Image (spheres, rainbow, N blue to C red):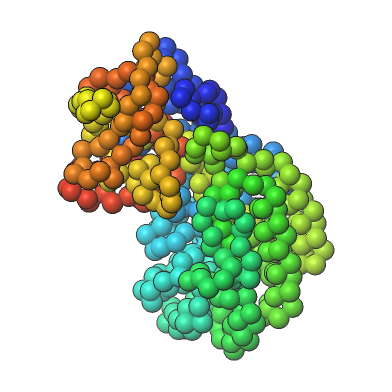
Amino acid sequence: MSASICPSHTLHCAFEVEGDRLQINGVPIDRLARRVGRTPFYAYDRSAIARRVDELRRQLPPEIHLHYALKANPMPAVVHDLAVRVDGLDVASAGEMQVALDTGTAPERISFAGPGKTDAELMQAVAAGVVINIESERELEAIAHCGAVTGVAPCFAARVNPDFELKSSGMKMGGGPKQFGLDAERVPQLFARAKQLDVRFIGLHIFSGSQNLRAESIIEAQQKSVDLALRLAEQAPAPIRLLNIGGGFGIPYFPGDKPLEVEPIGRNLAELAAHVHRTLPQAQLVIELGRYLVGEAGIYVCRIVDRKVSRGEVFLVTDGGLHHHLAASGNFGQVLRKNYPVIIANRVHGAEREIANVVGPLCTPLDLLASRMDLARAEPGDLVAVLQSGAYGLTASPTAFLGHPAAVEILV
């Protein structure tokens, strides 16, 4: 997905730089800002998303079904664009389910996960005909009731909390006590109960972690997931037709991060797919990706409204901040704050450079987008762009904090 090197950062960008201005799908950043009409805004590059999916298709075996997890970026235009490029959509709320259904994606290609589904959400999911990833015994009983009320046989997969985790992952979703899914040792009991109910079992969902840049860790987790699925299949109430082994593919954010090597993962998946086909001939093998598909294709743009010097340090004060982009401020899971890649978008390289801080308008010292970064010298009116912002941006941020206007989102 890379096209150029970001100055003051070791990461590659998904975007070209021409005339010292960042280009989003060929549109200069200052022109794009005028098109949007105001700052701050998020811009997502559809050509960068398409390139990422195409790259994956080339590196993964054709037997692998690729699903997009809406939680990474549920903007309807982005979801509509991806819906025709992937094989299925994974949602984590009734709201996301409606966005997915609005794309025209067949309900059986939509799966609904999450540990706290309400009875109302389960009723909506059963009525819609989507695949429900069951996360507890209560949910199984609830969907059976919904099926009796609606006259629709609920279709479900069992989400499994495995007894292993995705090593070196940014966020661990399996192994040990977790709120996600059913502990692997309790799944056979769920299967026994499902045989007594009017429900349709179609498969398993095993998700062990996310944001991982180590191919060997992902390969190990995928192998263990398939091995676990084969053991559980022996007691399943019906043949497994869907085997979702999660994702975990990470993207580089910080200096020193190296892009994930997908090729060895693809080779391993080819072997796993052949093994699954021999032992579970009806099963589709699915990987579920979110951040990896959209993260590098998005930027967050805000405008400098003031420039000040405090005890020798430059502070560029912008009209955007943590209320729109919590992750970039370091307050979305980072233990030690690190700078996201940040540039002055309308003078990327700049005739002059300086060490500066980029802050937002909020009355908290946490509102920090860049700390002591090497940037082109900037003035009020210039545009700041935070790269790697296509995933877990606006919807993962406290947008109501202090009552500032919401950011705009566009797909270019």
Q: Position of residue 184 (x, y in %)?
A: 62, 75
The mark tally for this picture is 0
Q: Position of residue 232 (x, y in %)?
A: 70, 75
Nearest the camera: 79 or 355?
355
**Seen from this angle, which residue lies furthest right?**
278
The N terminus, quarter of image: top right
**Seen from this angle, which residue lies furthest bottom?**
196
Nearest the camera: 406 or 172?
172
Left or right: where 166 falls relative to 307: right
Residue 27: tell me if it is visible: no
Q: Is residue 146 above or below residue 368?
A: below
Q: Is residue 30 above or below residue 298?
A: above
Q: Is residue 150 above or below residue 275?
A: below
**Residue 51's quadrant in the figure?**
top right
**Residue 277's quadrant in the figure?**
bottom right
Residue 368: tell me if it is visible: yes
Q: Residue at x 56, y 46 (%)?
A: 250
Q: Residue at x 43, y 37 (%)?
A: 340
Q: Position of residue 80 (x, y in %)?
A: 46, 45
The C terminus, quarter of image: top left
Left or right: where 253 falls relative to 347: right
**Seen from this angle, which residue lies furthest front?**
311
Q: Residue at x 61, y 63 (%)?
A: 165
Q: Residue at x 44, y 45 (%)?
A: 391
**Residue 146's quadrant in the figure?**
bottom left
Nearest the camera: 279 or 324?
324
